[in-house]
Image (cartoon, rainbow, N blue to C red):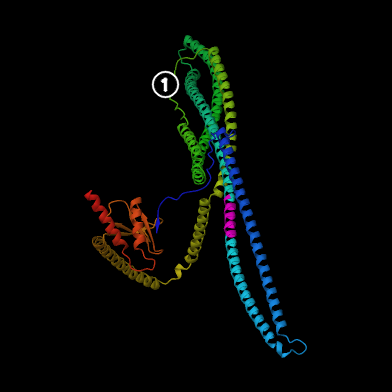
Amino acid sequence: MASDGPSARSGLTPIRSSDGLSPVKVPREADLSWQVWNRESESMRHHYEDIIRRKDDEFRKLKQNFDFLKDEAQQQQSKLKNQEQILAAEKRRSLSPKPGSIPSSSEVELKSKVNSLVVLLKEKEAEVNQLKQENALLDQNLRENNQELQQTLDDHQAELDLLKQQAASHRAENVDREQLTDEIRRLSSQVTDLKAKVSSKEQRQFSVAVLEEELARYRKHASELEGAKLRIKELELDNMKLEARLNSPRPATNNDGTYLELLAVKDKYDELSIEFKGLLDKCQWLEDQGLELAGQVEAAEAKVSAMRDERDEAQRQTQLRQTEIDFLRNQINSGSDNGDYIKRLEAQVEELRRTTQQQQPLQPPTSQSPSSSPSVKRMRVENDVYKKLRQQNTEYAVQVKRLDQAKQQLEGQVKRLEQIISQQKDVRVLQLRANPLTTDQFIKQEQIDALREENRALRDENWHQRDVVPKATYDALQQEMSVVRSRVDSVGKRNLRLKEQYQKMTTKVTAAIIRYFGYEFRFVEDPTNPLQVTSKLKLQSKHYQGSGYLIIDIDTQELEVHGPPEFKSLCTSVAEQWVDPQNKPTLLLAALSLKLFSSSNSDRAA
């Protein structure tokens, strides 16, 4: 009969590692705990060595005693053999005839001597028998002592083997603790790397914001250049109109004043054309510079998007590190007590992950189109326009230098991130190779691929044979398939009816058993497959209002008790009284029902 009580675990106190997140320095508390554990292991090793030494001394003494008793028994056996030989010689000497004739007068004396010798022989034989009995007893005692000594020796040898196993397990625990300490330090270094990545991402976001501001200024200048282009086109249109007027034939009524005015306008137009051509060239140059800067900005935006992808990859790597930390925490909890350090490590990793998630990249501001139409007023003189364009050119050159510096910084950060990501990928590949779940998934994927290839080969093989099947055969197969489907439908309906009847009968039987036997029973479901049941039967008495119940395993013939301690003690006492080891009919359930009924009545009365 088994109960589900908690099992006690024995062993040494595990190392409590309390080092922080620094990948280089180990805190003083970890050194102190490690020194304490070393002292405890050293004292325990000396204690075990003293025990082994004492056991060896006891075994040596027992072996010496056994050798002494064995020599003494051999001496007693040799003495007994010598005594038997002496008695046999005396008997032969007394019975052998002497030379010469014996006078008749001494026959009586000779007979008396013979009789005395016979009596003496009988006494000696009695002594010999007694010595044989003593020897047998001594031999039996020696055998018993030998068996006891051998049993003691076996016990000591078993204790010695157990001590050796404990020492080996302690050494293995030391190795595991060292490995866990190294793993914790590695995770601390990874957390430090993640902090560095977060700081670099913050700097990158700041540089991205600066680039977006400069891009907005470039777009504003581009809109101004578009307005200047529109003004130039309008002036060219006016120029064409004036040229058409000048090239037209003069009217018959020649108005010299108007003609001179047109000539003056044409000269002024030529000057303005030269000025506008210079401005057009400068605008074209500024436009080229703007396009080049726009290309650089687009490249920077592409770099920024790549860095965002890398940041997402770093977040995924952080999640993977979190999963790995959970896995290591489970291992550490099962082998040693490093829970405090792991909790602090998880808290910092969670904080880093939240910080990474909160730092979303800034969206570039949308450029607002100019609300007002381009100005159609007359531009200023050449000097002011030239100064303004030169100032803008200088600003553009400064901005280009800034963009080049930012580009170089971003390229360096991208290279560092690529190195870190490649290292993380290598570590991830090693972890995936060492993970048994991943290996199982790879095996399953290979099996699925092999089955797909086999299915595709069979489909291709049978594809050419489809036209060979005659139509009559196909119709016959369809007819058989319809018949089989009708049979399957009828069998399915019959199964449904049988299931309904089975459920009704099961409900009736369960109600009858609960009513007349006082127990509600059901089979325990399989935890791995809820659609199947195990061979365990759960019994719960209706006379007991608590959470206690019995489980009977039909295969192993075992009874398990689940519930509070008083219910377990009651079931144990009843089982010891009524369960018969010779498979005779018992009254276990009836006795338990009476006990529970009486206890419930007493509780109600109280």
Helix, strand or loop under label 1: loop
Kindly give the residue lying farthest to the left in the view shown.
Answer: 605
Over which residues does the magenta segment extend? Answer: 152-166
| Residue 555 is inside the magenta segment | no
Q: Which amino acid type is marked by label 1?
A: Ser
Which residue is the site of mark 1? 373
Q: Main secondary structure of the magenta part?
A: helix
Camera-nearest residue between 130 and 344: 130
Q: Position of residue 459 (x, y in %)?
A: 48, 63
Decide if residue 23 is on the left or right side of residue 478: right
Task: Please tell me which residue is depicted at 66% across the width and 62% down the height of the picture.
Answer: 68
Horizontal placement of 586 versus 363: left or right? left
Residue 426 appears in the picture as rendered = no
Please provide percent x and percent y for residue 353: 48, 35
Report the quarter where the N terminus lies. Answer: bottom left
Mark 1 nearby-residue class (10 Å; few <14, some 14–19, many ≥20): few
Decide if residue 204 is in sight here. yes
Residue 547 appears at what percent x and percent y? 31, 51
View extreme (top): residue: 257
Percent coordinates x, y for residue 319 in the rendering:
49, 40
In the displayed structure, 465 sits above or below 97; it is above
Count of marks overlaid on the render: 1
Q: Quadrant of residue 530?
A: bottom left
Which residue is more in the foreground, 253 or 559?
559
Residue placed most toward the observer, 39 or 510: 39
